[in-house]
Image (cartoon, rainbow, N blue to C red):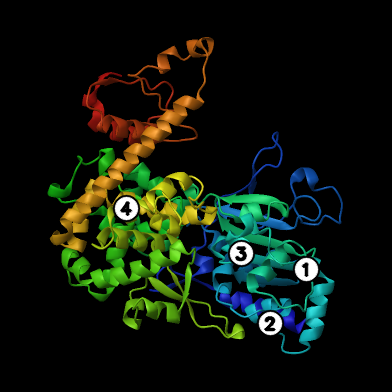
Amino acid sequence: EAYKSKLRRHHEDGSQSLQMYSHLGHLALDDIYTETQLHALPTAADEQPLVLTLDTLLQPPPAAAGIGADVGRRPGPPGKDVVLLSGDAGSGKSVLVQKLRREWAKGAAYAEFEFLFSFSCRHLNHVRKEICLRDLLFNNCCCPDTCPDKVFEYVLRRPDRTLLVFDAMDEFRGDMACGGGGGGDVAMCASPEGAAPAFVLVANVLRGNLLRGAKKIVTSRTNSDVKVMLETHVGRNVVASGFSKDAVMAYLSKRREGEGVASRATEQLLQSDPNIYSLCQIPLYCWIVSQCHGLLRQPQPPQHRSAPAGSPDSSLTITEIYLSMLEVCLSHSQPQQGQEALFGASLPLLRRLGSLAQKALLESETSFSSSRLKEHGLTEEDLAYGFLIKSQSYRGFGTEDVFVFMHVTFQAFFAALLLVLSADRSARDVLGHFPNFSRATPWRRLAPACVVGWQRRKQCRKLTDSEKSNLQLVSQFLSGLLSQRHSATLLKMAGRRNDGALRRKRGALRAHLRRCLRVHLEDLAASVRLTRRDMAGYRGHLTCDFLWVVCCRVGGAGAPFHLAFVLQHATAALSAELDNNHIEDLGVRQLLPCLHKLDQL
């Protein structure tokens, strides 16, 4: 009982405040927490997705609730004790885990579990020595003050009373995450006293070789290797899809409580642009908008504006949101400088951060030791900007302090900045960070041309799902940074002497995107094998001058917003048929600047 109380105090103290994505402050978790939408994926074709909350995450489906008392709260078939919680980067998985810890510590939820052990896989990457199950449990959380052997024996004897949580499983570096096609050749470890590398130990816990019967919750980014690795052990797949529209406003009202003017300004910003409203359904983006709403509301200078106000091209993009956040963090240390001077003075810092971010992402690494930071020339003054934060360190394992970027998406952003701003990074280096760009093994680049031609297909290195996910983040920022609308900002950062290099990179990227689009459309056309009879019903939709925009589950002004984007780039007058689309006032405001492009509505 003494250890149970100590463990609850440990989790309550550790989850009391929510560290902001930068280390410029903390917020009380109970004051700021907003529910994220959770949906359990159906296991059969005739089932509907089940809406969940934090309290019902482990409850069995309604159809299985009356199977028997031995099922308890475990979802899925017996023996499948893993709940896999997946979602896009920034969808609130880690915050949900923190809230779960706090609710358990206060006795408000999951009271049937006597023990809760929570692990961050990005931190376990830095445990270099071999450890046993006792080390994993006690050194990670807290060690019993008395009779540790008896406590450990009780945990082994009653694993059904234990809840294990593994956060950011896709950021685990090791054979279980990227080797053996999903971890098939991870060594077996079934002895509680046996020592093994941390990732081997975790893999065996999740597969039931250790603590069989314990409940496990695993969080991971969407489309990672984790789902394949745990496919036969997952009893429920849950998707975190971010905030609902009501939750967006609820979160912003909590963030701006006591700041009436700022709160109203942020609300007006969201209502004026459906694009940024949809972005705010991702909790991370919602936080950034609340942080730098003042910059986001500033009108763009006329000489840099490529589209009239109110048109789709004048709306905010993800890249602009991150650039605004970058300016906010830099200005904390240099508040009196203008944007051009601020970016120019910070260029060495951005290059150091980009060097660390880019090299680490290629190695699927998202956490760093102090010595790794020194290798890239990062100092204590650099850490003061808040882009890198000190995370929990595992003194029980004898490791160094662990540092992470404020979010993995910021790591991808800095990697993209380095590729764009550095004169020594060529256009091919930029394209090499796109998942669909052909890659070769190092020896192939040195091989004679005849060997290359013979082995071209055979020797191309296949990317893992985790690598694809990391490259996808980088490529999205590369596309945004090298777009024409950000050319002036990049010149401020890189200097006019690098204008030629920026133009070459922008041209290479445009050519690559054109090739990808052409290949995609050709593959799409080839995959639609319609007979003459099949085409009869689609004759009006399969002509060269007809664009069929299908919007699924897009509410409010989403459909007219996408139509306005197409009209903005149309070179000739068009006819539009809106059928039963819901336009609303916001949709009308989006379409009004484009009405001159229509000859029939």
* CA distance for labels 3 and 2: 34 Å
Q: Is residue 475 left or right of residue 80?
A: left
Q: Nearer the viewer, residue 516 or 393?
A: 516
> The C terminus appears in which quarter of the rendering?
top left
For marks 3 and 4 on the same chain, the one whose residue lies earlier in the sequence: 3
Residue 263 versus residue 381 in the image, above or below = above
Q: Residue at x 63, y 65 (%)?
A: 166
Residue 549, quarter of picture: top left
Q: Are marks 3 and 2 in contact (CB under 8 Å)?
A: no
Residue highlighted by disc 3: 175
Mark 4 Cα-neighbour bin, 10 Å: few <14, some 14–19, many ≥20: few
Mark 1 Cα-neighbour bin, 10 Å: few <14, some 14–19, many ≥20: many
Q: Which mark is nearer the camera, 2 or 1?
A: 1
The kind of residue on which mark 4 rests is Arg
For marks 4 and 1 on the same chain, the one whose residue lies earlier in the sequence: 1
Q: Residue at x 83, y 70 (%)?
A: 158
Q: Is residue 443 left or right of residue 424?
A: right
Q: Are marks 1 and 3 in contact (CB under 8 Å)?
A: no
* CA distance for labels 4 and 1: 49 Å
Residue highlighted by disc 4: 428
Q: Which mark is nearer the camera, 4 or 1?
A: 4
Q: Is residue 94 left or right of residue 482?
A: right
Residue 347, quarter of picture: bottom left
For marks 2 and 4 on the same chain, the one whose residue lies earlier in the sequence: 2
Q: Secondary structure at mark 3?
A: helix
For marks 1 and 3 on the same chain, the one whose residue lies earlier in the sequence: 3
Q: Which mark is nearer the camera, 3 or 4?
A: 4
Q: Nearer the viewer, residue 433 or 292?
A: 433
For marks 3 and 2 on the same chain, the one whose residue lies earlier in the sequence: 2
Residue 355 versus residue 500 in the image, above or below = below
Residue highlighted by disc 2: 6
